[in-house]
Amino acid sequence: MKKGFTLIELLAVIVILGVIATIVIPAITDTINNSREDAFEEQKSVVLNAAKRWGTENVRELPLNNGQSIEKSLKCLKEEGYLNSEKEVIDPTTDKEMNGCVKITYDASNNQYKYEYQSTCSKNEVCN
């Protein structure tokens, strides 16, 4: 009675596992990266919604001329209660706190404001 596996059988199993790993690992990596990008877009959406609430309550501070814009920092949105200050807004792609701004631009062609997240602010904003 023979017990165990031959060297050829063990090598065949190792090769098969290597081929499976070569196929599966990139797919898993892509899935993780895609989920981080989706989470980042969701975080940006939360930030933009907070800025829109701020804009609704602070209409007098919004720009009035076509193309004119202002920036509202995430720090100020937190301090003023538009973002949850107890929970950090984390960038899932870097696992660090988001510290950017929302640029609010007036578009006279459709009489609306455009809200755009920017990872950096062009100037230091003093919060109210």
Image (cartoon, grey):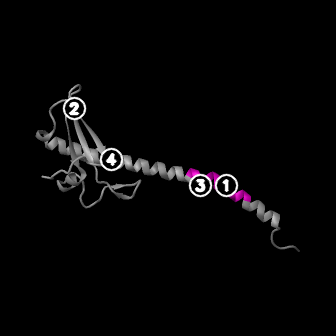
Query: How far, Cα to Cα, is label 1 from label 3?
Result: 8 Å
Is 102 inside the magenta-drawn segment? Answer: no
Residue 99 place in picture, x, y as percent:
28, 54
Amino acid under label 2?
A: Gly
Q: Which residues are magenta?
A: 15-27
- Which residue corresponds to mark 4? 44
What residue is pinned by disc 1? 20
Please give the name of the residue rendered at 18% of the width and 45% of the height, measured from the top-left corner: 54
Q: Report the residue marked by disc 3.
A: 25
Mark 4: few, some, or many residues within 10 Å (few <14, many ≥20)? many
Q: Looking at the image, which residue is at 81% across and 69% down?
A: 5
Based on the picture, tell me whether residue 25 belongs to the magenta stretch: yes
In the image, which disc is placed on residue 1?
none
Q: Secondary structure at mark 4?
A: helix
Which badge, 2 or 4, comes first in the chain's sequence? 4
Residue found farthest to the front: 123
Tell me the residue that label 2 is attached to.
67
